[in-house]
Amino acid sequence: MFLYCYARSGKAKNTGEKLLKEAEGEWIDDMESFAAGLGTNVRRADGTVVLIMPQDLCVKILLERLYPSDVKYPVINITPDGKYAGILRAGGYNTYQILAKISSILGSTCLSGEDDLKDAAPDLMRTVMAYQMKPDSEQLLKEIAEHISNGGTVDVYSDLPLEMSEPVLDSLTYRTFLFQSNQKNELDQAYAAACEEERYSVFITCGNIRGKVTGSKALILVPRIIVAGVEVAGKADPDYAARTCRETLSNHGINPDAVVTIAVSALARESDAVKAIAEDLGCFVTFFDSRLLKAVRVPLAGGFTTEKTGADFCTAAACLASDNGKILIRRAGDRNSALVTASIKRSPVLLTE
């Protein structure tokens, strides 16, 4: 560790001198020059800012000098008499170890500890239940949920929009990496890299990740947020219709486990083929009156025109059931069996509540 110490009073400077006799570091002459200098000079990877002064003054420096200057170092506060020490901002995995070393040198009482993050830890299992997420490993899900509840951090990768109710606190637990929906290869590459790491990571997607690895610390979660509008032929074989629907979704890069409901016309809800599709996907059936479906208008594909066009029944049903969500595939499949339109709800996945 390399300590950048800042103090104003004689008592505080004496405390700092005692600290720097035992630890590597240097004094900060003035905070403005220090913060400005870090923007142009090479930063030490093991650097830590140590503010030896009352806590309210430290907070003012942190908010008005260090944050605006984008200083990324951990910030530790020590009272001028050296009796108490605590973390104002963590940075990296070893901030608490640095605090422990400082406290052992000065004989200070630690006001911060590694268990502090437990009080603000989000509940991963609550999110999984809220979106009926299917994990690729139940055991790994339990391990990661326990790791988070104990104050641990995880990397979260997703090609879906994510939101956190308290980003300031939740970002201490979740380090998010977001991809566009057309960055399928990049997401697959991120997963392959994460499988080689020793730290936990979570991938939230409605797609199929290639090269799934068992035994790694990378968890795949599939939220149920996709609506499948379905049309079935009058004499469609139920088993073949179910297989057609599943294969159509998979062939278009959609994980069938992401489907939350099947949307059909009121006339089709009693069809054996529709029942077989719903049973195969493990979801409910939502139905709409044909007059309502005929009134639905959807934009033409590609976004090149504002002209509206009448929707086929499976597309209309998908739009209604997903609250006009984004259409992923439109009327694909087998005309003699089942046709599918998949639509995803536009609201982001709430990672924390």
Image (cartoon, grey):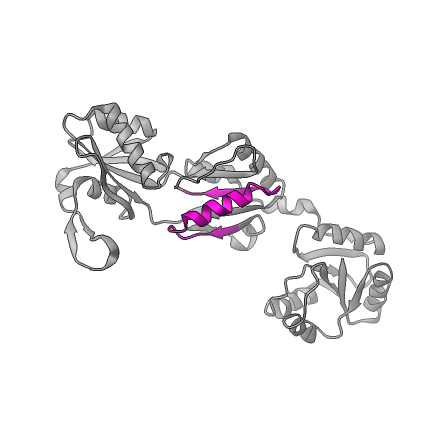
241 or 269: which is nearer to us? 241
Q: Image quarter for residue 53?
A: bottom right
Number of numbered labels in the structure image = 0
109 or 130: which is nearer to us? 130
195 or 206: which is nearer to us? 195
24 on left or right of 147: right
Q: In this view, does 60 lie above or below 334?
A: below
Residue 17 is inside the magenta segment: no
201 on left or right of 222: right
Q: Where is residue 293 in the image (x, y as percent from the top left)?
A: 16, 42
82 on left or right of 133: right
Q: Is residue 284 above or below residue 350?
A: above
Q: Where is residue 157 in the image (x, y as percent from the top left)?
A: 49, 47
Magenta span: 176-205
| Residue shown at the point (16%, 54%) measured from the top left | 308
Q: In this view, does 298 lie above or below 66?
A: above
| Residue shown at the point (63%, 47%) measured from the top left | 117
64 or 325: which is nearer to us? 325
| Residue shown at the point (71%, 48%) measured from the top left | 113
Screen quadrant of the N terminus: bottom right
| Residue shown at the point (53%, 32%) measured from the top left | 214
Q: Where is residue 16 in the image (x, y as percent from the top left)?
A: 82, 65
Q: In this view, does 166 lie above or below 196?
A: below
Q: Image quarter for residue 154?
A: top right
Residue 182 is inside the magenta segment: yes
Q: Is residue 352 visible?
A: no
Q: Where is residue 256 in the image (x, y as percent from the top left)?
A: 35, 35
Q: Image quarter for residue 82?
A: bottom right
Q: Is residue 244 visible?
A: yes
